[in-house]
Amino acid sequence: MRIVFMGTPAFAVPSLEKLIEAGHEIVGVFTQPDKPKNRGMKLLPPPVKVCAQEHEIPVYQPTKLRDGTALAQIQALAPELIVVAAYGRILPDEILDYPNLGCINVHSSLLPRYRGAAPINWAILNGDEKTGVTIMHMATELDAGDIITQAETAIDPDEDAETLYQRLADMGGALLISAVEQLAAGTATRTPQEAAGVTLAPMLGRELSPIDWKRSAQEIHNQVRGLIPWPTATTDAITGDTMKILVTQQTGEQTGAPAGTVVAAGKQGIDMACGDGKILRIVELQAAGKKRMKAADYLRGNPISIP
């Protein structure tokens, strides 16, 4: 099948690779423009561009989608289907309507739950026990199209967003191939999303980072897991200086200490009192200007006295 693929981050790479492995003709890849990164602010290509170039697939990086240029490029490529996976752009109706088989999207949630930019993070932030991947027909409204197929997976209680991201990326690639086969055979279904189940997953921001130790140990544990790798949970409760909290562990232990108090600090980590009377252990952290490290290693150079 002649396919135009649209995607940008690492999440989309397994979907592109699976399409190539399945023998589909990827006539073009659309991705976001290269962006400056790291200290040198060197322009770096998005992961999907790197993958496409490795397979010698033409790459297009339009800055706009509504001036007619992208549509003309797509028309010249004449795809039967457009596949979108975390492209980061809303497609105008004239592009959505162009391919004979339409446009389909790989979305990292069990729609209609978590429409939007950060479904993986919000599933963990909200303490969900399961999530999954949805392949859907695209519609004008964001992530609102009819569902073709879904796959579900459990979220491990200690799994962070970075690990879940890769698992769902791989699941999405495998599920996509099944959906494309159904479209080719004319057997793909269209299941409308139930309006009553719609929830949103807006973009993350640094305002989510500060830890409120008056919350429960479980809620804070979810915050730490859900904000990896960015913007990460932070606290100034340990030393007065803000530091990133990267890995935590629920001990199951109780304490009568006030929320936000350090109750123990040693080889296992830094134990913090939470609002529900439970202890949450900080296992890995990153102090300002320092590298990521085990809390025990941090304590060797920065001992904490416990009252």
Image (spheres, rainbow, N blue to C red):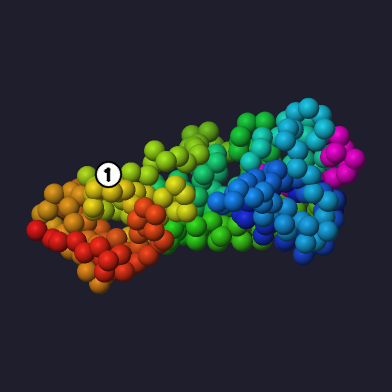
Is residue 154 highlighted in magenta? no
Residue 104 visible in the picture: no
Residue 167 visible in the picture: yes
From the viewer's perspective, is 102 left or right of 203? Answer: right
**Magenta span:** 71-87
- The residue furthest top is 67
- At a point 39% along the width and 58% down the height, the residue shown is 290
- At a point 20% along the width and 49% down the height, the residue shown is 260
Is residue 74 highlighted in magenta? yes
Quadrant of the image for the C terminus? bottom left
From the viewer's perspective, is 30 left or right of 167? Answer: right
Which amino acid lies under the numbered mark 1 shown in the image of this protein? Asp
Q: Quadrant of residue 160?
A: bottom left
- At a point 18% along the width and 56% down the height, the residue shown is 262
- Judging from the image, what secondary structure is the residue with disc 1 in? loop
Q: Position of residue 275 (x, y in %)?
A: 20, 48
Which residue is denoted by mark 1 in the rendering?
Answer: 212
Q: Position of residue 206 (x, y in %)?
A: 42, 41
Q: Nearer the viewer, residue 184 or 35?
A: 35
From the viewer's perspective, is 6 left or right of 79? Answer: left
Q: Position of residue 192 (x, y in %)?
A: 62, 38
- At a point 67% along the width and 55% down the height, the residue shown is 47
From the viewer's perspective, is 272 left or right of 298? Answer: left
Q: Position of residue 300 (x, y in %)?
A: 26, 69
Residue 284 vs 97, above or below: the answer is: below
Residue 33 vs 155, above or below: the answer is: above
Q: Nearer the viewer, residue 58 or 276?
A: 58
- Few, some or many C-alpha atoms within 10 Å of disc 1 (few <14, some 14-19, many ≥20)? some
